[in-house]
Amino acid sequence: MKVWIVHQHAVPPSLPGSVRPFALAKELVSRGHEVVIPASSFNHWTRTEMRLQAGEDSRSEVVDGVQFLWLRAPAYPGSGAMRFVSMLSYATNLFSSRALRALGPPDVIVGSSPNLIAAYGAERLANDLGAAFVFEVRDIWPQSLVDVGRMSPRHPVVKLMGWMENHLVRNAGSIVSLLPTNADYYVEKGAQVQGYFWVPNGVYLPDLPHPKPIPHNERFTVLFAGIHGIANGLDTVLEAAQVLSEAGVGDKVLFRFLGDGGEKPRLVQRALDMGLTNVEFLDAVPKGQVPEMLAQADAGLLILKKSPVFRWGVSPNKLFDYLGAGRPVIYAVESSNNPVEEAGAGVTVRAEDPDDLAAGVVRLMDTPRDERQRMGDRARAYVEEHHDFARLGDRFEQALQHAVALSRLVN
């Protein structure tokens, strides 16, 4: 098959960002398929231009057999109106790109959310080129804007994205979802059960170093690695750090924040205002360097705000980074699934509860080191069995083949 995976923020492992499209594309290439990833040359995580020079509209780059086609999209500072403009510009450039069309029509185009505008552009492009269309659902949009972003259901952007979501669901040959329990949600919107495929996030084992033993840190180090966004509720971590300091154990614990995002400047300032000495903010690093950072930590932290949208489950990249690095995880999420509990790889605390988070940190810190090491060993075994991209690539390929077969049957 000739496959196009449309994901605005896709990057190779040498850059900070979303490497899932590349990992799945690499699996498809290993199975004999040809894959192109049209992506924005503006990096969402570093807020920098990655590949294009002044006057360039596109540039092609091949990484491990996967072809990236970098497209122009406007820069933006945060998650406001300019980001929406960038989404719209990327989708427009996707549809009009001469460089992309010069590659010849694909058999199937995958349109990935959360940029529903780009996914809609991908569906329109597939229709124009006579290709099958696969809708990949990373988060449930626009409901996440309402439940997490606190936007009104009557907001024009929410209404527009709601219409796009319904259109994409009804016109997709297959739906690929990262979330484990949202099949009914999409069936109610018109999806076919036989065209639904659960393909969660995962790790690429050949590139993942063997886990290092739990370190002997002077301070029990808890690492949060990823986007510093509204949905993460990282204020809870700062408040938990304050709780620990007031309890007289602040000097025994260090929270490290690795990454970037719209909330980071405010969080850095708030930590300063609170006088916290047990938190540290680090710049984003390329995906390939994350295991090295995790090797220096005692535990990983997965934290999200309370939201009804998580009743469909969660599948954040950072969780599988933590587990793959062989680190216990503090799971501060209220969701329908709990991989940390399934794996026996850490502790679970209440979402948006700084006292419970602080107590969970102390509980894990006081756990004997050999038991924490066994948690880390179980974490690694869990991702090897359930979240290796080699296994996930099989499911992804099946979803594409289903859409292509259906398209040929209809046409």
Image (tube, rainbow, N blue to C red):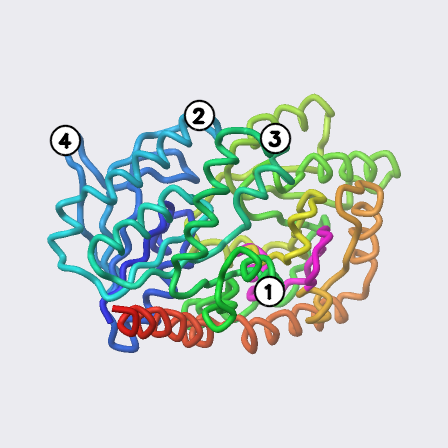
> Disc 1 versus disc 3: distance between alpha carbons?
27 Å
Q: Decide: marks 1, 3 in contact (CB < 8 A)?
A: no
Image quadrant containing the C terminus: bottom left
Residue 327 image point, x, y percent: 64, 63
Per the image, the residue denoted by label 2 is 81
Q: What residue type is disc 3 on?
A: Ser
The residue segment tinted magenta is 317-338
- Residue 64 in view, yes or no: no
Please give the label number shown on residue 55.
Answer: 4
Labels 3 and 2: the sequence-earlier one: 2
Q: What residue type is disc 2 on?
A: Ala
Q: Residues within 10 Å of mark 2 (few under 14, many from 20)?
A: few
319 drawn magenta: yes
Per the image, the residue denoted by label 1 is 180
Q: Residue furthest right?
A: 247
Q: Decide: marks 2, 1 in contact (CB < 8 A)?
A: no
> Disc 2 versus disc 1: distance between alpha carbons?
31 Å
Labels 1 and 3: the sequence-earlier one: 3
Please give the label number shown on residue 345.
Answer: none
Q: Tell me if 395 is positioned left or right of 336 in this view.
A: left
Judged by depth in the image, the label closer to the viewer, 4 or 1, is: 1
Q: Residues within 10 Å of mark 1 (few under 14, many from 20)?
A: some
Quick one: SS at disc 1?
loop
Quick one: SS at disc 3?
loop
- Residue 15 in view, yes or no: yes
19 vs 146: above or below = below
Per the image, the residue denoted by label 3 is 152
Labels 2 and 1: the sequence-earlier one: 2
